[in-house]
Image (spheres, rainbow, N blue to C red):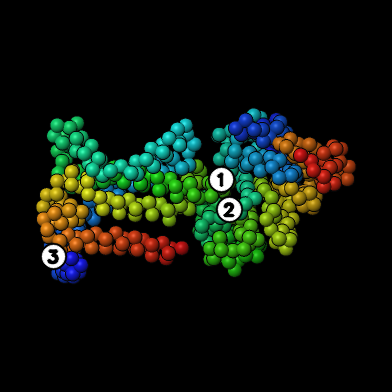
């Protein structure tokens, strides 16, 4: 069994090194879908995190609690919920988004919203509360002062974005239920791993797993190095 | 003419009264000390003067104008506050000092000239490109002061500027404050009565959120009228 795994890893590296067009296509599609989902989620999650952390409003603790609780939502549950919304009989069926990369992108962006909001809020709240007062006493407007706090929290905010991307590219439920794992169209790394493993194609499954791990590590490492360079 | 006038200021946080019916007048060009033990409400008072906080009751006038939401940005553009706890942006000394000038849209060459002049005045020009947070406590406080002075504010609010410093650094900061006395209006919050006497023209003694006594510094120290002032000057507990 151990030898089979080692053989699988060696074969997997051979497959990766050969630049197999199928493997390459699935990898690029995964990065594209999850990258877009991360950008999309960032458009509302970062401002939301900024508002939740800096503004005082009634129900602030409840809002934070809801986002924190949503961190643990099972991807299959979210996938099923969105399936019901996007399927032909559902309220958004007219858009005919089911089994498309767009559907996966939307699903993943919703999935990672709580991660991005909670981590951003936490990063912003860890900044010295007097930074905002400081910026304002130096002449900054409310918006400029908020941006100064955001800059101070940038390391944590970047971490929130990276963690969100990693969650998106690693999830299976949404990609499988909304994408349908259609070869050459909606097949991504995680759905390929699940499919090939159940079919007994362990080598391909391991290859895809190694690629997935490499993508996640490479991104985290690059951002880490960039941040160290900036410090 | 008064630069700042506080009329019957009250500040209540969650049912706790931090300031109680405070009325003060700060004159153009003077150095005014709000003196009192820790927790007496000095910081809250300075934040209200800096338009960083709002009074629960009462009126603040700046240069004759009633400070409300419309005048808040104007007050912030004319005044600046240095906090008791040194607060620095996570960047270089130069960028920390240049922050306010950038916000106020000064030209690049003007920013460079003014920052360099101020760093030189503070004797920290050699740290220009160093991360501000890597400096010693005294040097960090000088960066804070430089960041305020570079703006040449009409009103400079200093909250316990030497509270966390050793004697050598505290003396340096006091020398800098003395060097700008008269050029700008200074309001100093301090629990150190010797410092208040050394630096200020007039003093208000604040205890438990109320002004106990106010007047010219020397007069207040030589002939205190209030029993609590006498006790505070003599080092007795005044809570």
On screen, residue B186 versus residue A33, left or right, reads right
| Vertical order, A129 against A95 (above or below) | below
Residue A66 drawn at (x, y percent): 38, 37
Q: How crowded is mark 2: few (under 14 residues within 10 Å), some or many (20 or more)?
A: many
Depth check, mark 3 against mark 2: the one in front is 3
Q: Is residue A144 visible?
A: no
Residue B98 drawn at (x, y percent): 54, 57
- Disc assigned to residue B87: 2
Residue denoted by label 1: A133
Q: Nearer the viewer, residue B190 or B104?
A: B190
> Dividing the picture into quarters, in which one does residue A117 lie?
top left
Mark before the other along the chain sequence, 3 or 1:
3
Outermost residue toward the right in this view: B223
On screen, residue A76 versus residue B25, left or right, reads left
Q: Residues within 10 Å of mark 1 (few under 14, many from 20)?
A: many
Q: How crowded is mark 3: few (under 14 residues within 10 Å), some or many (20 or more)?
A: few
Residue denoted by label 3: A20
On screen, residue A81 versus residue A99, left or right, reads right
> Dividing the picture into quarters, in which one does residue B222 lie?
top right
Which residue is at a point 20% across and 35% down the rendered structure image?
A: A85
Q: How many marks?
A: 3
Q: Can residue A97 be seen in this view?
A: yes
Q: Do the residues labelled 2 and 1 touch (CB within 8 Å)?
A: yes
| Vertical order, B198 against B206 (above or below) | below
Kind of element beneath mark 2:
loop
Which residue is at a point 30% across and 63% down the rendered structure image?
A: A218
- The chain containing the residue under callout 3 comes to A
Callouts 2 and 1 on one subunit: no
């Amino acid at each position: 069994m151990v030898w089979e795994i080692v053989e699988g890893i060696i074969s997997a590296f051979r497959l990766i090194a050969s630049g197999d067009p199928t493997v390459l296509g699935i990898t690029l599609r995964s990065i594209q879908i999850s990258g877009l989902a991360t950008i999309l989620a960032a458009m509302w999650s970062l401002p939301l995190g900024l508002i939740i952390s800096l503004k005082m409003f009634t129900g602030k603790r409840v809002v934070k609690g809801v986002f924190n609780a949503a961190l643990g939502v099972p991807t299959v549950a979210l996938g099923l919920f969105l399936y019901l919304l996007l399927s032909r009989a559902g309220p958004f069926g007219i858009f005919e988004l089911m089994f498309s990369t767009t559907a996966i992108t939307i699903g993943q962006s919703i999935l990672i919203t709580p991660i991005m909001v909670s981590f951003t809020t936490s990063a912003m709240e860890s900044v010295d509360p007097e930074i905002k007062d400081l910026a304002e006493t130096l002449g900054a407007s409310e918006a400029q002062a908020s941006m100064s706090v955001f800059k101070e929290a940038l390391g944590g905010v970047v971490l929130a974005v990276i963690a969100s991307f990693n969650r998106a590219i690693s999830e299976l439920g949404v990609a499988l239920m909304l994408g349908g794992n259609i070869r050459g169209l909606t097949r991504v790394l995680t759905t390929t791993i699940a499919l090939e493993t159940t079919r007994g194609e362990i080598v391909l499954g391991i290859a895809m797993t190694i690629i997935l791990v490499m993508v996640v590590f490479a991104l985290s490492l690059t951002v880490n190095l960039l941040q160290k360079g900036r410090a | 003419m008064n630069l700042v006038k506080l009329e019957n200021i009250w500040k209540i946080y969650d049912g706790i009264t931090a300031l109680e019916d405070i009325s003060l007048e700060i004159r153009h060009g003077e150095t005014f000390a709000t003196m009192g033990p820790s927790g007496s409400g000095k910081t809250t008072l300075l934040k209200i003067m800096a338009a960083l906080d709002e009074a629960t009751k009462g009126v603040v006038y700046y240069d004759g104008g009633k400070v409300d939401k419309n005048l808040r940005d104007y007050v912030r553009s004319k005044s600046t506050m240095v906090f008791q706890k040194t607060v620095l942006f996570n960047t270089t000394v130069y960028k920390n000092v240049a922050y306010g000038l950038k916000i106020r849209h000064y030209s690049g060459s003007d920013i460079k000239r003014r920052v360099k002049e101020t760093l030189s005045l503070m004797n920290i020009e050699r740290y220009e490109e160093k991360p501000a947070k890597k400096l010693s406590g005294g040097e960090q406080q000088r960066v804070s002061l430089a960041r305020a002075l570079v703006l040449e504010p009409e009103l400079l609010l200093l909250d316990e500027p030497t509270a966390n410093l050793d004697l050598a650094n505290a003396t340096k900061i006091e020398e800098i404050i003395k060097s700008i006395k008269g050029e700008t209006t200074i309001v100093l919050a301090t629990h150190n009565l010797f410092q208040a006497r050394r630096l200020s023209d007039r003093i208000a003694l604040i205890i438990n959120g109320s002004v106990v006594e106010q007047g010219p510094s020397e007069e207040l120290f030589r002939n205190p009228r209030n029993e609590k002032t006498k006790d505070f000057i003599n080092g007795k507990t005044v809570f």
